[in-house]
Image (cartoon, coloured by chain):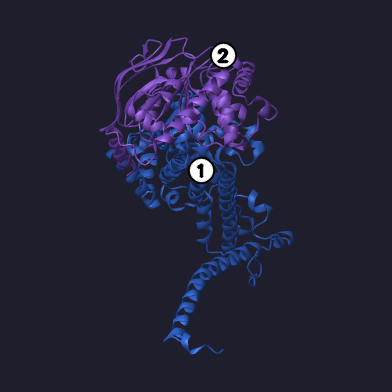
Amino acid sequence: MTSSMTMDRTTDAATGFLGTRPEGSRMTIMQSFSDLMHQRQERETHKRTRPVETEVVAKLDVRNLNFFYGEKQALFDVSMTIAERSVTAFIGPSGCGKSTFLRALNRMNDIIEGARHNGTVLLEGQEIYAPDVDVVALRKRVGMVFQKSTPFPKSIFDNVAYGPKIAGQRNRKALSEIVEQSLKRAALWDEVKDRLQDSALALSGGQQQRLCIARALATNPDVLLMDEPASALDPASTARIEDLIFELKQNYTIVIVTHNMQQAARISDRTAFFFQGYLIEVDATQKLFTTPTKKQTEDYITGKFG
Amino acid sequence: MSVPPKLQEPHLARRHRIGKAFEWLCCGSTWFGIVVLGVLLLSVGWKAMTWPAPKAKPAGSPTASTEAQQLSPPLSKKFFTNYHSRNPREAGLLSALWGSLWLTVLVALFSVPIGVGSAVYLEEYSIEGRLKRLIQLNLSNLAGVPSIVYALLGMTAFVKMFGLFHKDEEKTLVVNLLFTTVDVPLPFDRTLISGALTLTLLVLPTVIVASQEALRAVPSSIRIASYALGATQWQTIRHQVIPAAMPGIMTGVILALSRAIGEAAPLMLIGALTYVAYTPGDISNVSDIFKNPQGLLDAPFDKFTAIPLQIYQWINQPKAEYSHVAAAGIVVLLTILLLMNTAAILIRHRFQKQTRW
């Protein structure tokens, strides 16, 4: 039902029909994104992070990826590279394939019956779907945070220590060091340092989500995939998560799926727009939001559909 | 009461009467059960606490019973420390109590690994398909098979071992453990282990189905989160799924065990004895375990009796006093069952309070 509606709207978009929204408001939206970019640049200069798009070391390189759930094709010939130590945001309407694409990057789709693909996904030049790649090892390097925080029904400490523990770290002292490091990186340490043995389920929603980030960081991944990590959180918690993502990109390659375009504009270096299983456009965030080259992208970010 | 004429409807009073009558009928059905249960418990309880009124004794009969014995009711401390006796006032259920305890422990020991293992396989590993549906269907059917059918199977498989060992050449297999040996009779014959294995067959479908439900109740987000942290399937099951499902599994196991403990028919068929003047492995109190640890290994291969069987045997005795002894046995059995069910409820309750996903 929803998908058919979106499809109608695309057809409109393709034929250049501008819908009911007047041209003026489109300009205002573009302007507001432009303002966002300025705010961001100021913040980045202030934080002395390196400027956007100077380093183009490809961490992940996806070539001609097609993805199927049984008979249904979810991704069509997607190719893109994801730079090291950067934040890449995936935007697009529901069911556009952005989550599928994200999950293809650490083979979480393997769990789903009937999922298959063709094409290549290279992590530092190595095919992750190659037969000699162990998916367990891959997921240790490519961590993932989900939309709904899913703390294990265990203590805060055990939640964070779980990853290293199952990987074979038995040393109690080393474990508590990893836990402290991870919680600090996830900006949660100060809030929980006195109650590490308490149940993780007692934490607030925002804290739980940061705990899940800490838990993912504890396995020491190179890449962190985030599937709408802030969509279930209140604005204050969302702001904390966004700040955190900003900090984390110094050390990690971050890929984030978001429904919130302002969020994508605020935190990402590059943004990819997906629509109906196709990668429509991928570019530097600033460029994509201010001067998109594709009509569909423009229509989506100006709120014409989706 | 004066009702405005407009609100008068035909047969309204009658319809209300029918409704009221139905309510009373339902209430009556409920109370029927409660009253019957109450009468049963009271009469059994009363019987267990008193001896029948002494009949006029023929002169010259030995009146050995002293004042103290007269005073102690059938359900007394003595009842738990004595074996069955020809004198009803001396009869106790020591051997039956230990027999039932051993049965419970052994059934738990056999049915938990097999039951939970099957449930984990069916829920976590097996692929949806015809075979799984067939197994699932069989499981639900097996849970409803009468216990006497399992008893026949147990008789053939464990007591007689399909007649593999000829009657004349019954063997004893000496199993050499590192520090000691255990004599295992072949076939098992009418020993505890035959009874325990038969009861295991009986409760396995229940344990499997209960465990499956407990595993199914673990949200898949927990599994996915575990996989995302680089856990293997085994690690996910071991560290996340089974601990989360444990309270549900425990509840199912306890309820299944309480069914096993009350079963008489299968044990009777496989030929458990009713007059046993020793406890399995000669362990009749906790300190015996330390005095005679070898008894723990020998016990499963001893002949045995169990509480329901002992009750059945007492009821069949001609002496009137034995029915009071049987009542005492029933009180003990019901108390054990009640305690087990309470434990199951407490575990479930704690689980519900503790976990919010």
The x, y position of residue A14, in whole percent, is 28, 32
Residue at the disc numbered 1: B248
> In this rendering, which labeled residue sits more in front, label 1 or label 2?
2
| Viewer-nearest residue: B10 or B212 | B10
Does A103 sit above or below residue B51? above
Number of callouts in the render?
Answer: 2
Q: Quadrant of the N terminus of chain B?
A: bottom right
Disc 2 marks a residue whose amino acid type is Thr
Q: Quadrant of residue A239?
A: top right
Helix, strand or loop at mark 1: helix
Residue B27: percent from left, percent from top: 51, 72
Q: Nearer the viewer, residue B341 or A253?
A: A253
Specify whether residue B302 is in view. no
Q: Quadrant of residue A185?
A: top right
- Chain A shade in the render: purple
Within 10 Å of disc 1 (Cα), the crowding (few <14, some 14-19, many 20+) is many
Mark-to-mark CA distance, 1 and 2? 52 Å
Q: Residue furthest left?
A: A71
Q: Nearer the viewer, residue B347 or B86?
A: B347
Which SS class for mark 2? Answer: loop
Taking the spot 42% from the left edge, 33% from the top edge, the residue there is A26
Percent coordinates x, y for residue A48 in the rendering? 59, 13
**Figure check: A202 above or below A65:** below
Q: Give the letter of the chain under mark 1.
A: B
Question: In the image, which lettered chain appears blue?
Answer: B
Q: Residues within 10 Å of mark 2 (few under 14, many from 20)?
A: some
Q: Are marks 1 and 2 in contact (CB under 8 Å)?
A: no
The residue at the far front in this view is A24
Q: Which residue is mark 2?
A: A49
